[in-house]
Image (cartoon, rainbow, N blue to C red):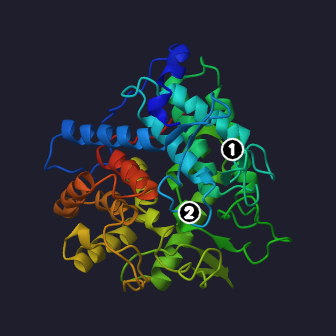
Amino acid sequence: MNIKNWQSFLGFRARAIKAKKPFPQHTKYKAGTIKPNHVDQAQLDQAVKDLYDSWKSSYLIQNPTNQDQYYVYYNLEGQDIYKSRSISTSESHGHGMLLTAFMAGYDPNAQSYYEGLFRFYKAHPSSNNPLLMAWKQNKDENGNIINAEGSESATDGDMDIAYSLLLAHNQWGNKGTIDYLTEAKKIIHAILTNDVNQEEWFLKLGDWVKKDTTPKYYPGTRPSDFMTEHMKAFQITTGNSKWTWVVNKTYAITKQLFHGYSANTGLLPDFAVKRNSKFAPAPPDFLEGPYDGDYYMNACRTTWRIPLDYILTGDRRAVPQFTKVNSWIKKKTNGDPGKIRAGYYLNGDDLPLAFNNHLAFVSPFAVSAMIHSRNQEWLNKLWTHMKNSSFENSDYYGNSIKLLCMLVASGNWWFPKP
């Protein structure tokens, strides 16, 4: 049952609290950063609204066996072709919790959706720490939604869920059915304890990575999890200085990979592994496939996640790297977003069989372009390309990343305060 069929269920939840930071917010970003300037602000906002409406009607689903829960249906288009019963992941769930918090005010039912998503998260805990979410959910033969393929967590989903709770606290306060701030502090502590390497303070792949039982993965990290502005929000909220250690280590790893392996492109790999005293791209088939050490389906998010910290907080540590990324991709495509390929080696060569116009690869370059005015024409082209790209011809991953990146590019991502 999709969202169009359960509007009546929301009727009894009309008590939703008025949004304190309603969309659109028109956040004042770091001085010197840019937004698309070939259309006016109202058009930027409307494009986000339209895409959110399409996203919500397609992917935000009521749990048929527990109607006060909602989940994000990441497998609508059957992209997980080998697992037809797969329905959701903590990664996609985190996206949904971010979006419903950001779009409150425009969406009068956003708090109801958000709290339903929260209840689904709580109903599917990690086996290692119940404050974290199991990374994937399937439907069993009876239609019940269960945790699948191990009940451990994935770091990116955990971090987005925690960040979304801070957004929710800013958006609705603590007068609802959920104490968002208290819940945020709980999961932030769990992330620091279970998703962070306690010896060197870098992000692990998830709470399942342990020195004694998974030694192969213990030195590994996933650069698409490098959400340093999330970490800063966690530090401000909790007062725990260890988050500053994680931020510093994250930027150090990013710099090592850039200078050591992608000086001509700035690209980051899907996974990185510590070898001796430094991090290097992971070898093929480290975790997911032959391109684990290349710019592929995970790393495509880095050009959104990492520059966002500079846009919001002014932290310049990754600016040289993403300046290189921007100059490289403009030259590589001759200024045509439609020529961005779905995967590159770190030296900039195309991966085999990589195709054009995967929105999960195109859209994050718009966020990266925002760091300097010299990218204005390129950013305008990227915005137009995103706006004009067909929702129906993409998939959950591409449409979700496009929406999150358009939210940033339109000036409507804001930093939560405790």
Disc marking residue 134: none
Q: Is residue 393 left or right of residue 162?
A: left
Of 186 and 51, which appears nearest the observer?
Answer: 51
Image position, residue 43 (x, y; %): 19, 40
Percent of width and height locating residue 197: 72, 63
Mark 2 — residue? 80
Question: How far from the left and from the top, in percent, is residue 143?
Answer: 68, 44
Q: Callout 2, which amino acid?
A: Asp
- In the drawing, does residue 335 fall left or right of residue 354? left
Left or right: 373, with 272 as reference point: left
Secondary structure of the residue carrying tag 2 is loop
Say which of marks 2 and 1 sits in front.
Answer: 1
- Image quadrant occupied by the C terminus: top right
Q: Residue at x 20, y 63 (%)?
A: 378
Can the viewer see residue 16 in this picture? no
The residue under label 1 is 143
Q: CA distance from mark 2 to mark 1?
A: 18 Å
The residue nearer to you, when weighing 73 against 263, is 73
